[in-house]
């Protein structure tokens, strides 16, 4: 029996003649607080999330795989939060990691945990998700992240996971398992987030450069070294609000499906801490390959350009989170960095590097989906 808004109980999820069944992922709170029964589709039924109970070894093994994905996320996406502030030498790498990790951590308190719900219910039909689907999705995303990390390409960990979920879900139940509304919104974000980041960063760069046209280079550099600390913090806050929660959602769904969270879905505090530590460790251990690509190979950055790129990226992430649109922080900051470079002159952007990044973006979803489908077919027989 679930609690209704205002404190009253809702028997049988509010359907005439329905009975009180074990809570499932389909009854998770939707963005805005409302419960979604059967994912809101006519005729859908509330069925248990996992077909069978998992043993402790398998359950914690899947939690470990999820944390490994979060570590890989640190190699990829968390590097975006510190690339500009490290490349402009405003902060040393280790200090920048701690700075980004702090704002990533507090983001869940600022924005809530809506992204965790989106990962669980907005890509594939939650009623078909089981341990094999989750393992396939995580494995596909990890494999693709490792491949692009080896090439130093900032592909999106978020879209790798989304592609992985879609691929494993289709492998199990066919194309009818895909929630095309949520997947379409994500695809729209792929296009709009880098464009908006590009436009905003370019406009901010033009305004800031004109506002400081009479200042000496030394004064501008000193002023924006301080301001870039703020912009880096805001971007990391946006990163945590729109991206860092996906592994929290995966682990929480696993625990909830096994009855370890009680009748109400929530993300335990230890899960938040574990995911943030895994992400920060990944950034510390190997994210510098992508920091180099993002901060130096696309275009040369000074503190004033770093401030403009981070501010444009942060505004984009704040707007997307406010409207409930899942976007890629990788795409957003890359678009913003290119926008800042183009604000100086078009030749300041190394377009061949940008072209390689765009190619990685385009193939991330289908590549991760294919790998996850193969993993699902290979493991579902056991």
Image (cartoon, grey):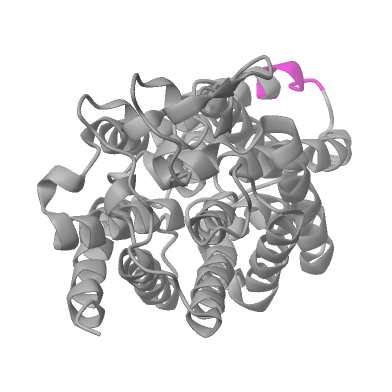
Q: Is residue 314 visible?
A: yes
Q: Is residue 341 visible?
A: no
The residue nearer to you, when weighing 354 against 279, is 279
Relative placement, left or right, of 190 versus 112 is: left
Identified at 62% across, 17% down, the residue is: 5
The residue nearer to you, when weighing 129 against 13, is 13
Identified at 26% across, 68% down, the residue is: 372
Count of residue discs:
0
x%, y% of residue 20? 45, 36
**78 drawn magenta:** no
Q: Quadrant of the N terminus?
A: top right
x%, y% of residue 322? 56, 22
- Range shown magenta: 209-214
* Rendered view: 265 above or below 140: above
Relative placement, left or right, of 158 versus 289 is: left
Relative placement, left or right, of 220 versus 196 is: right
x%, y% of residue 351? 35, 50
Identified at 52% across, 68% down, the residue is: 66
x%, y% of residue 43? 20, 29
Identified at 32% across, 43% down, the residue is: 123
**211 drawn magenta:** yes
Corner quadrant of residue 276: bottom right
Corner quadrant of residue 376: bottom left
Q: Quadrant of the C terminus?
A: bottom left
């Amino acid at each position: 029996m679930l609690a209704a808004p205002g404190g009253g109980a809702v028997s049988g999820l509010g359907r005439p003649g329905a009975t009180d069944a074990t809570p499932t992922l389909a009854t998770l709170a939707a963005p805005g607080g409302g419960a979604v029964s059967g994912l809101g589709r006519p005729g859908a039924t509330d069925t248990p999330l996992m077909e069978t109970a998992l043993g402790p070894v398998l359950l914690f093994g899947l939690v470990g795989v999820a944390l490994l994905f979060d570590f890989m996320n640190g190699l990829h996406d968390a590097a975006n939060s510190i690339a500009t502030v490290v490349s402009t030498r405003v902060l040393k790498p280790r200090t920048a990691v701690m700075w980004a990790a702090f704002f990533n951590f507090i983001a869940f308190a600022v924005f809530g945990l809506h992204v965790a719900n989106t990962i669980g219910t907005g890509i594939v039909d939650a009623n078909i998700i089981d341990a094999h689907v989750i393992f396939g999705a995580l494995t596909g995303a990890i494999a693709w992240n490792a491949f692009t990390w080896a090439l130093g390409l900032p592909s999106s960990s978020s879209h790798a996971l989304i592609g992985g979920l879609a691929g494993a879900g289709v492998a199990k139940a066919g194309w009818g398992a895909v929630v095309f509304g949520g997947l379409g919104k994500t695809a729209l974000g792929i296009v709009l987030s880098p464009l908006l980041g590009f436009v905003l960063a370019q406009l901010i760069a033009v305004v800031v450069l004109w506002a400081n046209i009479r200042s000496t280079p030394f004064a501008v550099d000193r002023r924006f070294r301080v301001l870039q600390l703020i912009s880096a913090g805001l971007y990391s806050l946006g990163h945590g609000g729109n991206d860092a929660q996906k592994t929290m959602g995966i682990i929480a769904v696993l625990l909830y499906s096994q009855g370890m969270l009680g009748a109400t879905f929530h993300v335990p505090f230890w899960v938040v801490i574990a995911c943030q530590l895994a992400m920060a460790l990944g950034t510390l251990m190997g994210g510098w390959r992508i920091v180099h690509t993002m901060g130096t190979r696309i275009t040369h950055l000074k503190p004033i350009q770093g401030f403009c790129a981070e501010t444009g990226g942060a505004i984009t992430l704040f707007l997307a989170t406010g409207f409930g649109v899942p976007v890629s922080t990788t795409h957003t900051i890359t678009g913003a960095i290119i926008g800042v470079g183009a604000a100086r002159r078009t030749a300041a952007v190394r377009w061949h590097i940008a072209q390689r990044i765009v190619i990685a973006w385009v193939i991330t979803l289908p590549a991760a989906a294919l790998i996850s489908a193969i993993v699902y077919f290979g493991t579902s027989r056991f």
